[in-house]
Image: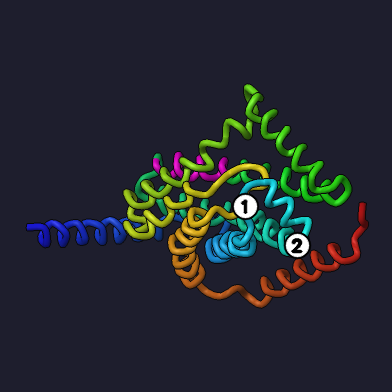
Amino acid sequence: MIKDRFRRWRRADSARQAANAAAYHQQNHPFPGRWISGISLVCAPVLLLTGILLRIRFHFFYPDQLAAYDSHPTLITTAYACFAFGVVLLWPGVMALAQRIAATHPSWALWGGGLVMFGLFTRTFQFGTDHLSFHLTDSLGTQTMVEAIGDYYQSWRDTPWHPFKTLSAPAFLGWVVLAVAAYRSGALGVGRAVALGLMSMLALGTLKGTEVPQSIIAAAGLCVALVPFGIQTLRAGPRPTNRALGWIAVCVVTTALAAAYGPRG
């Protein structure tokens, strides 16, 4: 009896994924495009996991994060930069997954994709406060900044309304909604959908480091959910033309030169 139910459930899950794939391939998705979406799906989760692992040996709360920066500034700066870049780079991948969900379940795609995208903006806002805190530590000292961030947390709790305070909930709940949407639509199987929902475990807040094991589980789940989808997306069409590769090289070189020799201050 249990075996028969499991087989029926597996067949229904496979049929749902096949129907979603067929519906998705019948539609046209010009933006953000296969290559940007695929690179996002592959690289963004890896960058998030890298940032989390780089700061794993330090306690996650802000006094310890500031002390870690004071003693290992390059390591902590790299860790937070990898995490922030991963958050920013996630948006094309989330959009691609939402488009895949929308092929059969547009309302679920709207809510799941929208909530997660607003949550990404919230995490980017929080990184701005992290970046400022670290730079002020260089001039004001660790102890002064520990007291200042404590005051900031109290002030933030006392703030009755702020757009990014309101959007804190989507940073957590959006991943659960997107995971349910991905499963119901057939965009992801049950295992990868559950792995995607684990991102709701990732802490949010100024100078929040790596919580063990929650942060690692969340980022690893994101890798399991999105990286195979990204590889599939990249392999779903022809390679870029030589002209496109040439323009990519020009953009990369221009960006590198601007970063190295552009005006400072």
Instruction: Examine the image and state in which quarter residue 129 appears.
Output: top right
Task: Please tell me whether the stretch drawn in magenta is mainly helix, strand or loop.
Answer: helix
Identify the residue at horizontal 34%, vertical 59% (top origin). 191
Q: Residue furthest top?
A: 160
Mark 1 and mark 2 in contact? Answer it, CB < 8 Å: no
Is residue 175 placed above or below 218 in the rendered structure?
above
Identify the residue at horizontal 74%, vertical 73% (top origin). 249
Q: Earlier in the sequence, mark 1 or mark 2?
A: 2
Q: Residues within 10 Å of mark 2 (few under 14, many from 20)?
A: few
Identify the residue position indicated by label 2 in the image: 72
The quadrant in which the N terminus is found is bottom left
Identify the residue position indicated by label 1 in the image: 209
Could you tell me which secondary element the residue under label 2 belongs to?
A: loop
Q: Which residues are magenta?
A: 108-119
Give the amino acid at mark 2. Answer: His
In the shown orientation, is residue 215 left or right of residue 185? right
